[in-house]
Amino acid sequence: MKAAVNHQFKGKLEIEQLDKPTISSHEVLVKIHACGVCHTDLHACHGDWPVKPKMPLVPGHEGVGEIVEVGDQVSHCKLGDRVGIPWLYSACGHCDYCLTGDENLCLSQQNAGYSVDGSYAEYCKADGNYVVKIPDGIDYVDAAPLFCAGVTTYKALKVSTAKPGEWVAIFGIGGLGHLAVQYAVAMGLNVIAVDTGEAKLELAKKLGASLCLDFKRDDVVAKVLAETGGVHASICTAVSKSGFEQSYKVIRRGGKCVLVGLPPEDMPLPIFDTVLNGVSVVGSIVGTRKDLIECLDFAARGKVKAITIEKSLEDINDIFEEMINGEITGRVVMKF
């Protein structure tokens, strides 16, 4: 099978011919039809994080396709099922986190395209218990980004506990943020979008944001406080220090600042203001299978649609370069 393989950190990915994976009794083999490209894939290939991925590595954790082989201990999936292989490739199923609905925090989890080979390939094997079926009415290209960008932003909004009619600020209207705006609107929230550039702000407005602010031109904090008195929650998908600082400062007393983006530097937290104002600063990491099923349902009902740019596997190094330069609006999906 054809696959994109990373052999060393910061090296170019090579398009190679590999053996088709052999599955065990609890696994399925998926013929990949499309795979989204996530910034996490770039971090993996560059070795940016403290916990390093396996090498050599086939990246990819937004792979979707058709099951073509089923292990003999898999009973809830069958040949021909349309499924996706998410970041949460598997978990132990027995720890406190797994048993209390927080399987995305399992310390024994495996991650697709990081600790195990992922979906930058024509075929990918997966744990049969952790693939999630794609609802009818969503094609492969539209489904792929929801298996990471979609579920990540949907989960962050759930973590924020913001209620219909309340205000939420989304910082960063990129691959994650443009979906966050749509999920927030579908959940009945009033949305403030923060990014820079006319194209991204126009996109946010088109997707339903009530107020769109350019952090290079606008006094974001002053305008948000004047408009709302402080938002009930902010979702920070941005990876800049200034983005974090602004997302914190726009929170009203008792509100939540939900962190999603993974910046390369430490961020100072004003402890006095946090305590005095009863502000919560929380992290949110992808989501569970249940979260993913819910987020796919929004798309199946026409409430959310990823903005995609179709590419091929052979384009991956150019895609990464565009990602580094911030030239991508929406989500790139490699179609097989």
Image (cartoon, rainbow, N blue to C red):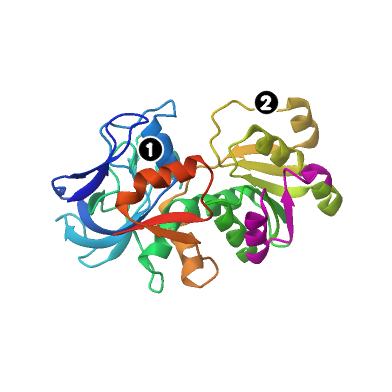
Task: Return the x and y of residue 100 as percentages of the image width and height.
Answer: 45, 45
Closer-to-camera residue (251/39): 39
Instruction: Count residues near mark 2 (Cα–Cα under 10 Å), then give few for <14, some for 14-19, many for 20+.
Output: few
The kind of secondary structure element at disc 2 is loop
Residue 264 visible in this rendered orientation of the protein: yes
Task: Return the x and y of residue 42 as percentages of the image width and height.
Answer: 41, 39
Instruction: Count residues near mark 1 (Cα–Cα under 10 Å), then give few for <14, some for 14-19, many for 20+.
Output: some
Which residue position holds label 1? 95
Name the residue type under label 1. Answer: Cys
Task: Return the x and y of residue 180 as percentages of the image width and height.
Answer: 58, 55
The magenta segment is 196-222
Residue 96 visible in this rendered orientation of the protein: no
216 magenta-colored: yes
Q: Please state, as top left, top right, bottom left or bottom right, where the C terminus lies in the image.
A: bottom left
Name the residue type under label 2. Answer: Pro
- On screen, residue 280 versus residue 223, left or right, reads left
- Residue shown at 59%/48% (left/top)? 159
Closer-to-camera residue (144/129): 144
- Which of the 4 image quadrants contains residue 69? bottom left
Furthest residue in direction right, as rendered: 226
- Residue shown at 68%/58% (left/top)? 163
Q: Is residue 24 above or below residue 116?
A: below
Instruction: Compute the Cα span from label 2 to label 1.
Output: 33 Å
- Residue shown at 41%/74% (left/top)? 137
Which residue position holds label 2? 268
293 magenta-colored: no
